[in-house]
Amino acid sequence: MDGGDFASVLETVRRFVREVVVPAEDVIEETDEIPEEIRRGAAEMGLFGYALPEEYGGLGCDALQDALLAMEAGYTTPAFRSMFGTNNGIAGQVLVNFGTERQKREFLPRMAAGECVAAFALTEPEAGSDPSGLRTGAVADGGHYVINGQKRFITNAGRSDILLVFARTGGPGADGISVFVVDTDTPGVTVGPPDRKMGQRGSTTSEIFFRDVRVPASRLVGEVESEGFGAAMRSLAKGRLHIAACCVGMAQRLVDESVSYAASARQGGTVIGEFQQVQALIAESQTDLLAGRALVLETARAYDSGADRRLAPSSAKLFCSEMVGRVADRAVQIHGGSGYIHGVAVERFYRDARLYRLYEGTSEIQKVIIARRLLSTATVR
């Protein structure tokens, strides 16, 4: 998307988030649902396909534009971004990067229009941040594959129309994994009830069970076996950059809430913003925020140029997910007892922020990726 068009989209999204979504945050928290008018508005703006190619109905945003949009979406409840995040990110990018032309034309236009929600069915009870140990299996049977297994913590599973299901078609380890497009209503697919999470209400995760699920061989992504692990890793790398940007957006909101509260709340007749220790908390959070934003933008530029699509995204995800946790903690501290009360924005964001250190690769996994990458290129003296 060219710069002029993107600037208009970015401003429209920014206004929609602040004027429509932010006022609905309490309703989303209470009902655990995104209001239909918000979903419809997001679809009309093209948010269900902003990172999908224009030739398939998307907006064709590059990684830098994706990051800037994620910062705006991240300013409000994470459920808003999550509603369309899998279409653009970890699920949609599997089809963009590895699907056949027929598969792209069958699914991507509907995903871009918001008519089809895709879920990324990778995580299992014994295979989380390291998916190479997944156990779900797919056995060839004539012109079909038969899938059996279980998935865990799958975002949008209960609201999905299609599932990008990673299953073992070969031997152990990463090389034996393939990925399939499975209609959620296929016989043998059972989506469990939504998980009762600590935070991020309005965004649902669920277990999925596969029992003798028959899938046409034409639904094997790329119509080639054993490309699933590579597809997952490539999608997750870009997804980590996206999540880092979401963390920056949330940190901005937390700083804004902290500054607003500190400028108006009084203690002993004095505005608390005049207290140096409160000022120090605000200053530390603003510095964290600026560092995270700079890291995300530089990482996005490197991703777009092809200079770094692995090390920097993990670094950005590690730093920003930890950073927003620190900012959230300081925001609660600035609010004092009020920050511990339901209905206060910083209390909700404090719970919401915790998940960012876990999904799409824990902080510990990011450290492993970063260290191994650097060590693999080290010069031994």
Image (cartoon, rainbow, N blue to C red):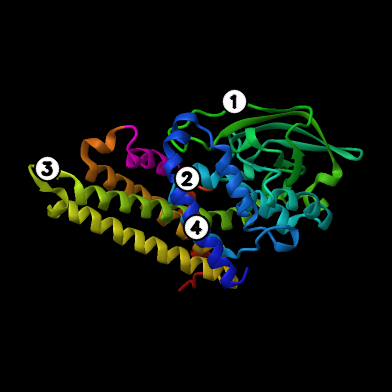
Q: Residue 238, position in %: x, y?
A: 58, 58
Instruction: Determine contact: label 1, label 3, CB under 8 Å.
Output: no
- State the mark number for residue 193: 1
**Element under disc 1:** loop
Amino acid on which the number 1 mark rests in the picture: Pro
Specify the quadrant that holds the C terminus: bottom left
Side (left or right) of 364 relative to 145: left
- State the mark number for residue 267: 3
C-alpha span from label 4 to label 2? 29 Å
**Element under disc 2:** helix
Tell me which numbered mark, 2 or 1, is placed earlier along the sequence. Answer: 2
Q: Residue 142, position in %: x, y?
A: 92, 38
C-alpha span from label 3 to label 4? 42 Å
170 above or below 311?
above
C-alpha span from label 2 to label 1? 26 Å
Amino acid on which the number 2 mark rests in the picture: Val
Instruction: Determine contact: label 4, label 2, CB under 8 Å.
Output: no
User: Do we see residue 353 in this rendering?
Assistant: yes
Q: Which residues are magenta?
A: 342-358
Tell me which numbered mark, 4 or 1, is placed earlier along the sequence. Answer: 1
Q: Tell me the quarter of the picture where residue 190 sits.
A: top right
Say which of 357 and 366 sits in front: 357
Q: Tell me the quarter of the picture where residue 295 sits.
A: bottom left
**Residue under numbered circle 4:** 314
